[in-house]
């Protein structure tokens, strides 16, 4: 299918409009072909009624110019209009849009063929009905301004039909009128071809530029999304940073106030972290913080949230748990931290963490009080016995 598409004259001609470094992608050419066919089908649907209406309206001219043959001419116009309407039907169905240019050609030839038949039956070379042929050619150019070779071939066929109708007619001969008509229709055909050349080139170039703009906007959207996600993440630990975790807390507190529900907030830090920094250096301290974040993130459930509070302090928000379940899950986190295998210059380094926690009371607590109670519980643990878990009650410690 792609091979056939590239051999199509409309694409051979328009490919030169795109830089040689980046030729149109195959999917872009296919998309453009579909757009062109859809546009032609839409124009046929909207113009067939106008075109046929104008075509039939010239029956009034037939009565004035050829009263004896007016009824026969009317029959020719009716047959040509009905056949054009039948040919137009596929353009109302999406599956047949790929044949729209062929139906446009056929409709133009049917209507012009009817006029040529009237020229044959009327005055032959002296007939001025070639004006109707020119009008129909212009309508054809409006409908199909994309396929250059289609319009060129149709124009040549029309000239041939007119010449056959005139030369085969024995009703009259006027070399001047015949020559003028041929020049008139040739000029119209040249205009149609020239307009198709110009319009299709401009249209294709605009399409490519529009698609490139869409692609740029899509890339910018992706980059913006990445930047937005990165703004939520702490660089060292790859978990939520303090600012975004506070946004989560604020939103969850609002939900709990509306639904009279609750969650648990825990603040924990690494025991004797200053000693780790002083003994092993800050780079190793950063490695410890990142390792703790990875370990905790692996242990907590998907419905929990982990964020960095600052320095070596972290926050965990846990939903949908009884007090026993909550404490059990915190103990798993504590144990996972204690079992971490950390080495400094080949020697193991043991660490532990202390935990302060609080259950949200949606009536009595706001974000500030919730964090304050959890932090107070953590300080209480660090003053008494590090490495433990302290759950504050709803009114305090």
Image (spheres, rainbow, N blue to C red):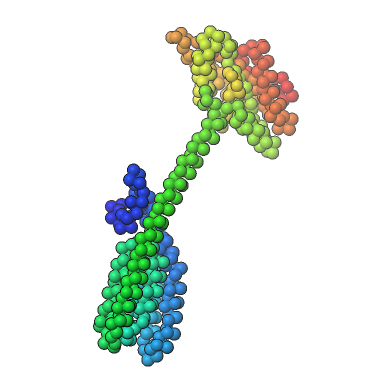
Snapshot quadrant of residue 185: bottom left
Snapshot quadrant of residue 305: top right
Above or below 279: residue 22: below
Q: Where is residue 297 in the image (x, y as percent from the top left)?
A: 52, 25
Of residue 108 and residue 384, the one placed in the foreground of this image is 108
Q: What's the residue at 33%, 77% (across, down)?
A: 181
Q: Can residue 329 be seen in this view?
A: yes
Above or below 18: residue 191: below
* In this picture, residue 15 sits left or right of residue 61: left
Q: What's the residue at 70%, 36% (across, down)?
A: 257
Snapshot quadrant of residue 266: top right
Q: Position of residue 300 (x, y in %)?
A: 54, 26
Q: Position of residue 99 (x, y in %)?
A: 35, 63
In the image as oriented, which residue stretches furthest toward the front? 176
Of residue 201 and residue 291, the one placed in the foreground of this image is 201
Q: What's the residue at 40%, 60% (across, down)?
A: 199
Of residue 87 and residue 180, the one placed in the foreground of this image is 180
Q: What's the residue at 31%, 63% (across, down)?
A: 149
Q: Where is residue 84 in the image (x, y as percent from the top left)?
A: 38, 73
In the image as oriented, which residue stretches furthest toward the bottom? 68
């Amino acid at each position: 299918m792609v091979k056939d598409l590239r051999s199509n004259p409309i694409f051979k001609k328009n490919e030169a409009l795109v830089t040689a470094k980046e030729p149109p992608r195959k999917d872009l050419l296919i998309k453009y072909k579909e757009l062109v066919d859809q546009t032609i089908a839409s124009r046929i649907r909207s113009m067939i009624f106008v075109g046929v209406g104008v075509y039939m309206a010239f029956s009034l001219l037939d009565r004035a110019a050829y009263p004896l043959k007016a009824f026969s001419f009317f029959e020719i116009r009716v047959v040509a209009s009905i056949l054009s309407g039948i040919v137009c039907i596929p353009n109302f169905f999406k599956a047949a849009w790929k044949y729209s240019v062929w139906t446009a050609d056929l409709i133009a030839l049917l209507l012009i063929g009817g006029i040529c038949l009237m020229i044959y039956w009327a005055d032959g070379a002296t007939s001025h009905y070639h004006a109707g042929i020119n009008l129909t050619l212009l309508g054809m150019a409006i409908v199909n301004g994309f396929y250059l070779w289609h319009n060129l071939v149709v124009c040549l066929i029309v000239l041939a039909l007119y010449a056959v109708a005139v030369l085969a007619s024995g009703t009259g001969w006027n070399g001047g009128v015949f020559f003028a008509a041929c020049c008139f229709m040739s000029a119209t055909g040249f205009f149609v071809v020239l307009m198709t050349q110009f319009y299709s080139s401009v249209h294709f170039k605009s399409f490519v530029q529009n698609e490139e703009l869409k692609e740029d906007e899509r890339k910018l959207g992706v980059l913006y999304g990445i930047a937005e996600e990165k703004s939520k993440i702490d660089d060292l630990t790859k978990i939520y940073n303090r600012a975004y975790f506070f946004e989560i807390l604020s939103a969850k507190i609002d939900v709990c106030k509306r639904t009279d529900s609750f969650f648990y907030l825990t603040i924990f830090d690494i025991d004797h972290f200053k000693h780790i920094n002083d003994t092993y250096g800050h780079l190793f301290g950063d490695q410890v913080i990142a390792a703790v974040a990875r370990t905790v993130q692996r242990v907590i459930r998907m419905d929990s949230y982990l964020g960095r509070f600052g320095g070596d302090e972290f926050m965990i928000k846990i939903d949908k748990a009884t007090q026993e379940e909550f404490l059990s899950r915190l103990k798993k986190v504590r144990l996972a931290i204690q079992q971490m295998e950390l080495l400094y210059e080949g020697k193991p380094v043991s660490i532990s963490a202390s935990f302060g926690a609080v259950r949200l009371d949606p009536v009595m607590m706001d974000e500030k009080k919730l964090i304050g109670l959890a932090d107070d519980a953590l300080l209480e643990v660090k003053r008494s016995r590090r490495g433990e878990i302290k759950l504050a009650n709803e009114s305090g410690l």
